[in-house]
Image (cartoon, helix red, strand yellow):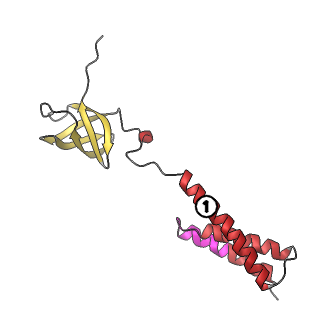
Amino acid sequence: MMQTWMLWIGGGLVLMAMEALAPGAFMLWLGLAALGTGIAAYLGVEGFALHVIVFAIFSSISVSIGLALRRTVRPTGVNAPGSGLVGRSATVLSFNGGEGRVRLGDSDWPARLVEAGPQPSPMEPLEVVAVDGMVLLVRPHQMTQA
């Protein structure tokens, strides 16, 4: 006959497997709480009511930890300073007025000039000065004095 602690451990493993199939949910934290409840049941906590209370406490703690980690570990987007696009050189593909397309690395990007001036010609290098969503903000390369 299966003991109660085995059910909690099995349920915790199932919840953690669900997290692997649907990442981004919070089943991992509930799975950890179920594992903790299973360990508590194995160590002698008896009675359904106590198991529910232990699970609720472990769930509160683990979900709180998960939410705290989610707030501190944010994925960097394209427009994050660490994305490595600002300061790089892009090559003009086409421009019409102040908007056009440039090639940066192996990708084509929509671009917008940040300074008024002559329209850049194809194959002209431009410098990326910022990113606005998915649009690169560019300007002609600044000539440095030697």
Q: Position of residue 52 (x, y in %)?
A: 73, 80
Query: Any magenta on residue 10?
Result: no
Name which residue lies at 58% across and 73% down: 18
Between 51 and 76, the one lying in front of the other is 51
The residue stretch that appears in magenta: 13-26
**Residue drawn at x 16%, y 36% as measured from the top left:** 122
Q: Is residue 142 left or right of residue 40?
A: left
Disc 1 marks which residue?
66
Taking the view exactly as shown, the residue that stands out farthest to the bottom is: 1
The answer to whether residue 68 is left or right of residue 82 is right
Residue 129 percent location from the top left of the image: 31, 34
Q: Amino acid at mark 1?
A: Gly
Q: Position of residue 89 (x, y in %)?
A: 30, 32
65 left or right, relative to 53: left
Image: 125 above or below 70:
above
Q: Position of residue 108 (x, y in %)?
A: 27, 46
| Residue 26 as seen in the image, left or right of residue 122 | right
The quadrant the C terminus occupies is top left
Q: Can residue 26 be seen in this snapshot?
A: yes
Q: Quadrant of residue 50?
A: bottom right
Vertical comparison of 112 with 146: above or below: below
Q: Residue furthest top?
A: 146
Is any part of residue 9 visible from this angle?
Answer: no
Q: Secondary structure at mark 1?
A: helix
Above or below for 34 versus 85: below
Q: Tally the numbered discs.
A: 1
Would you identify the image quadrant in which residue 80 lies? top left
